[in-house]
Image (tube, rainbow, N blue to C red):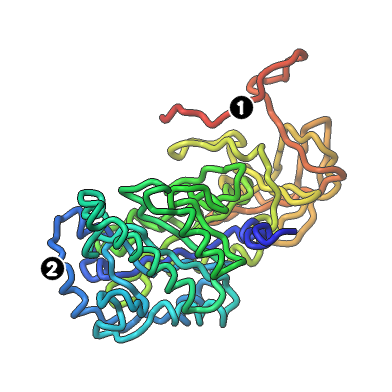
C-alpha cells in the first residue's frame, strides 16, 4: 500500500470527529464572520487581542470529553479568516502568545490529542482579513503584493506543519478570492506532504485533496468524505444562537455518514473564555453513551445504498420508522419511531439468521417469508429519545431493496430512487 493510501486509511474508518472553532470572534459572541458582516475596521478589531485571556481554554479537558463522546479525531482552527493565530507564528504579532493569554493554544491541543489517542487535525485559512498586504491587496495590486501575500500564507502553513510533530489532517479553508492556481496550491500541498509524509489533506485549497468536505449537510461521495456540520447554526460562538441539535439528530447524522461510508466532523464554537457551551455538553454526552452500546452499527461499517434515500424537513422516510447501516454479514435498523411489539421489514433480499436488540443484547424470535421479516417479543412502547438499533445477521452480504410500487415489475425498470430528490417540501 502506498503512502497516500496509508494517510487516508484511518480516515475512512474514523466516522466521528470534533471540530473546534475558537478565536477573537468568540469574545464578541456574534459568530466567526462578525468582522466581515459588521464591517469592523481592522484596527478596531485588532484591539480584541488585548483582552483575549483564554482563561478557561482547557485542551486536555476538551479532548478527554471528545474521547468520552466517542470521537476519533479533532480539528482545531489554528487561524480563522480574522487572521488571529492561536499558535506562536514568527510571521505576525497578531497571535495568542502576544495576548494576555500568553500561550500557544495549538501546542496544548496537539498534546491533548496525543495523550487521549485522537488523531490530530489542524485547520488553517488561506484568506486573512487582517494581513497587510491581504488577499484583496494581492488581487488589486498583484505586481506589488501578490507574491508576498502568498509567501505569508505558505509560510504560516509551513509553521504549523513543522512545529508540532506528526499531524494527521491538514484542513484548508477560506479559498476566496483565488482558485488553486492563484493559491499556488500544487506547491503548497507538495510542501505539506514533504513535511508530513503521512497526512490527509482536504480539497479546500482549490485543487483535489485526499477527501471532500460537504458543509452543513450529509452528501455521500465516491471519494473519501467528511460532512462538517455545526452543533447549532454558527461555527463560532454566538450568544444568541440557541438552535442546538438534539442527541437524536446527531445520532441520525452519524448513521447517514456511516451508511455512506463517510465521517461526521461535528463543530463546537467555544465561548470567549475558551469554555465549552453547556448545551453542547448536554447534547454530546448522551450521544457518547449511545455509541458505547451501538458502536458496531456506526464504526467500521460498509457503504449501504438502501439507506441513502433520506427524508426532507422531518417527513417520515422510506422505511418510516428508521433507516439502516451495514457491516459484513450484518445490517442494522436504527429505529427512531417505535412501531410496536412486532417489527416488520420488507425488501430483505438476503437470508436472516439472527435478530438482536443491541440495547438489551436480547435475541428475538423472527420469521422470514420471501423478502418480509417479522420480529416479535418487543414491548409495545419503547423509549426512542435515542434510536434503538436492531442487528440482523445474514448468511450472505446484506441486500435490501424496495421498488416504488406495491410490487416489483416483472420487466426491467429504473431503480427507486436512482438519485437524491430535488423536491423540497
SS at mark 2? Answer: helix
Q: Please provide percent x and percent y for residue 164.
A: 49, 78
Give the residue at mark 2.
Answer: 43
Residue for point 52% across, 48% down: 208
Label 2: few (<14), some (14–19) or many (≥20) C-alpha neighbours in 10 Å: few
The image quarter in which residue 138 lies: bottom left
Q: Please provide percent x and percent y for residue 401.
A: 71, 31
The image quarter in which residue 288 lies: bottom right
Please say if 133 is above or below 311.
Answer: below
Please say if 285 is above or below 297.
Answer: below
Distance CA(mark 2)–CA(mark 1) = 53 Å
Horizontal side of residue 231 vs 309, given as left or right: left
Residue for point 19% across, 73% down: 48
Q: In this rendered view, identify the residue nearer to me: 170 or 258.
A: 170
Residue 70 seen in the current view: no
Give the residue at mark 1.
Answer: 418
Please say if 66 is above or below 32.
Answer: below
Mark with earlier residue (2, 1): 2
Residue for point 43% across, 64% down: 123
Q: In this rendered view, identify the residue nearer to me: 116 or 361.
A: 116
SS at mark 1? Answer: loop
Q: In this rendered view, identify the residue nearer to me: 36 or 7.
A: 7
Mark 2 or 1, closer to the camera = 2
Which quadrant of the figure contains the C terminus? top left
Residue for point 37% across, 77% down: 87
Outermost residue, front direction? 143
Please say if 265 is above or below 118.
Answer: above
Residue 339 seen in the current view: yes
Label 1: few (<14), some (14–19) or many (≥20) C-alpha neighbours in 10 Å: few
Residue 293: which numbered mark, if any? none
Q: Please provide percent x and percent y for residue 249.
A: 49, 52
Amino acid at each position: 500500500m502506498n503512502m497516500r493510501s496509508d494517510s487516508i486509511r484511518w480516515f475512512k474508518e474514523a466516522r466521528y470527529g470534533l471540530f473546534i472553532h475558537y478565536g477573537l470572534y468568540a469574545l464578541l459572541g456574534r459568530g466567526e464572520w462578525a468582522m466581515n458582516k459588521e464591517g469592523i475596521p481592522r484596527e478596531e478589531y485588532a484591539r480584541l487581542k488585548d483582552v483575549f485571556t483564554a482563561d478557561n481554554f482547557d485542551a486536555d479537558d476538551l479532548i478527554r470529553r471528545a474521547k468520552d463522546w466517542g470521537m476519533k479525531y479533532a480539528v482545531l482552527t489554528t487561524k480563522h479568516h480574522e487572521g488571529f493565530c492561536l499558535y506562536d507564528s514568527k510571521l505576525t504579532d497578531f497571535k495568542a502568545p502576544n495576548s494576555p493569554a500568553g500561550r500557544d493554544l495549538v501546542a496544548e491541543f496537539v498534546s491533548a490529542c496525543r495523550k487521549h489517542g485522537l488523531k490530530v487535525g489542524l485547520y488553517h485559512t488561506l484568506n486573512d482579513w487582517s494581513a497587510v498586504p491581504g488577499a484583496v491587496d494581492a488581487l488589486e495590486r498583484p505586481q506589488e503584493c501578490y507574491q508576498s501575500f502568498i509567501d505569508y500564507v505558505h509560510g504560516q502553513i509551513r509553521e504549523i506543519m513543522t512545529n508540532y510533530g506528526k499531524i494527521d489532517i491538514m484542513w484548508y479553508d477560506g479559498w476566496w478570492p483565488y482558485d488553486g492556481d492563484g493559491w499556488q496550491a500544487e506547491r503548497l500541498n507538495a510542501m505539506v506532504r514533504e513535511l508530513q509524509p503521512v497526512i490527509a489533506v482536504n480539497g479546500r485549497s482549490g485543487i483535489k485533496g485526499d477527501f471532500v468536505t460537504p458543509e452543513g449537510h450529509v452528501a455521500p461521495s465516491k471519494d473519501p468524505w467528511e460532512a462538517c456540520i455545526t452543533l447549532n447554526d454558527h461555527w463560532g460562538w454566538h450568544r444568541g444562537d440557541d438552535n442546538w441539535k438534539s442527541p437524536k439528530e446527531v445520532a441520525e447524522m452519524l448513521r447517514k455518514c456511516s451508511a455512506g461510508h463517510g465521517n461526521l466532523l461535528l463543530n463546537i464554537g467555544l465561548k470567549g473564555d475558551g469554555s465549552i457551551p453547556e448545551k453542547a455538553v448536554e447534547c454530546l454526552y448522551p450521544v457518547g453513551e449511545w455509541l458505547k452500546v451501538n458502536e458496531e452499527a456506526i464504526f467500521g461499517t460498509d457503504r449501504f445504498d438502501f439507506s441513502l434515500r433520506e427524508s426532507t424537513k422531518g417527513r417520515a422516510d422510506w422505511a418510516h420508522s428508521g433507516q439502516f447501516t451495514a457491516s459484513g454479514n450484518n445490517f442494522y435498523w436504527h429505529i427512531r419511531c417505535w412501531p410496536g411489539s412486532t417489527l416488520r421489514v420488507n425488501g430483505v433480499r438476503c437470508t436472516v439468521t439472527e435478530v438482536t436488540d443491541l440495547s438489551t443484547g436480547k435475541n428475538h424470535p423472527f420469521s422470514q417469508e420471501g423478502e418480509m421479516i417479522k420480529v416479535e417479543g418487543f414491548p409495545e412502547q419503547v423509549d426512542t429519545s435515542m434510536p434503538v438499533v436492531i442487528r440482523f445477521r445474514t448468511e450472505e452480504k446484506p441486500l435490501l431493496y424496495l421498488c416504488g410500487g406495491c410490487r416489483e415489475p416483472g420487466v426491467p425498470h429504473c431503480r427507486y430512487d436512482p438519485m437524491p430528490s430535488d423536491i423540497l417540501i
